[in-house]
Image (cartoon, rainbow, N blue to C red):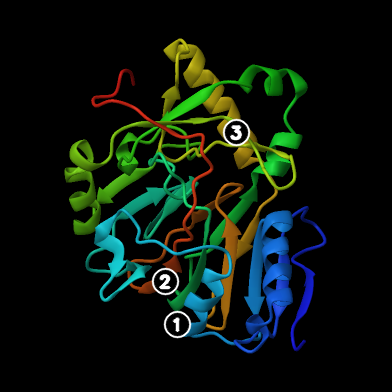
Amino acid sequence: MSFTVEPLSPDLTFGKTVRGLTSEDIKDEAVRGQLRKLWVEDGLVVFRDGEINEDFHLALSKIFGPLEAHPVKEILTEGKPELITLVSKPEDATVVVIDGEEGGGYLGWHTDLVYMKEINHGGILRALTPSEIGGVTGFIDQVDAYNRLPEELKDKIDGLSVVYRLHSFEEQKYMTREPVKVLRSSPATMGVISRRDKDFPPVAHPLVFVQPETGRKVLNYSPFFAMYVEGMDPDEGHKLLRQLSAHILDSRAYHHRWSTDEMILWDNWRMLHSVTPVPLDEERVMQRTTIKGDYGVGRKLAFPEAAE
C-alpha cells in the first residue's frame, strides 16, 4: 500500500489522517474495508498528499455508500447530480455579522439534512477555490459530546425528540451564543426559503442516537435548524436546547483551513460541522458529495408546525 494512516490530532478523541491514497489503492476491497472502518470508528477522515480530482472524489465517496442528489436543487452541480457546489461570491453571498465579524458563506453548527426525515450518512468535501481568510470548516464529535454530559442530563434527554425545520439565519435560535445579524440574503437562500412550506415540512429526530456498528450513544442534536422540543413546555424546552447548545459550543473541535490538495470525509450521523465567514472581497467555492442513508429514526410532521 502506498498510503499511511495516522491520528488527526493527539488532542482529539476522533479523526484520522490518510496520506497518499490513490485510485489504484481503492481498487482493493481490503483497502475499501479499512476506510469504511475508519469512517465508523473515527467519524472524520482527512485525505492529504494523494490523488485529488473530481473522478477520484466521486469514486472514493462511493466506497461508503450510494450517492444521491441533494434535496436543495439550488446547490446542485449542473450535469453532475451527485455533487453540490457551495459558492460564496462577493456579489451574491448571504452576508451576516457574527461575533462582530462581517462576511459571507457562514454556517453554524449543524447536521446536514437534519430538516429532512432521512439524514444522509455522510459526504466528502473538497475546495475548488479556498479563501485566504475565513472559510474554516469546524467539526465536533457528538459521541464525545454525549459522553461528557452530566448523568442527570443524559437521563433527561433520553426519549425526547427535537423538531427541525429548514429556516433562515434570522429564525435560528440555538446555533450561536449571540444572535446572527443578516445584512443581505443570497438569491439561492431566498429561493429555498420561498418553497419551504411546499417542499420542507417539519421533522422530528431523537436527541439520543445509538451508533449501530458500535453501540455508542450519540448526542443527536443540530443547533442550526432546531425549533423546539417535541411535547415539552416551550419555556422548558427552550432552556434545554440552550443548555445543550452551550455544551456543544464548549466542545473540543477540529478546525480545518482549506487548500486544494485535500478532502474530508465525515459521518453525518455523528459529526456536527460549521463554516466561518469569508471576507466579502473573496470568493470561496467548495464541492461535496452526499452519501445516501437513513438511520431510521426521523419522522415527518404535518404542515404547519404545531408550535414554535
In the image: residue 299, left or right of residue 220? left
Q: Residues within 10 Å of mark 1 (few under 14, many from 20)?
A: few
Query: Which mark is in front, 1 or 2?
Result: 1
Q: Is residue 142 above or below residue 80?
A: above
If you read the primary sequence from the N terminus, does the residue marked by circle 1 or circle 3 appear first? 1
Q: Earlier in the sequence, mark 1 or mark 2?
A: 1
Q: Nearer the viewer, mark 1 or mark 3?
A: 1
Identify the image quadrant of the N terminus. bottom right
The answer to whether residue 42 is seen in the rendering is: yes
Q: CA distance from mark 1 to mark 3?
A: 38 Å
Foreground pick, 134 / 173 = 173
In whole angstroms, how far apart are the C-alphas of marks 3 and 2? 30 Å
Q: Nearer the viewer, residue 56 or 235?
A: 56
| Residue type beneath disc 2 | Gln
The answer to whether residue 236 is left or right of residue 116 is right
The local secondary structure at tag 2 comes to strand
Real-space CA distance between mark 1 and mark 2, rounded to the nearest whole angstrom: 9 Å
Q: Position of residue 283 (x, y in %)?
A: 35, 74
Label 2 sits on residue:
287
Residue that lies at the very extreme toward the right in this rendered image: 10
Secondary structure under tag 3 reads helix
Amino acid under disc 3: Ala
The residue indicated by pointer 3 is 246
Question: Visible in this render: residue 132?
Answer: no
Query: Where does the image place residue 195, in percent across and percent down from the top left?
Result: 18, 44
* Above-or-below relation of 12 to 220: below
Which residue is nearer to you in this view: 304 or 184?
304
Q: Are marks 1 and 2 in contact (CB under 8 Å)?
A: yes
Within 10 Å of disc 3 (Cα), the crowding (few <14, some 14-19, many 20+) is some
On the image, which quarter does residue 257 sit in?
A: bottom right
Q: Which mark is in front, 3 or 2?
A: 2
Tag 1 residue:
54
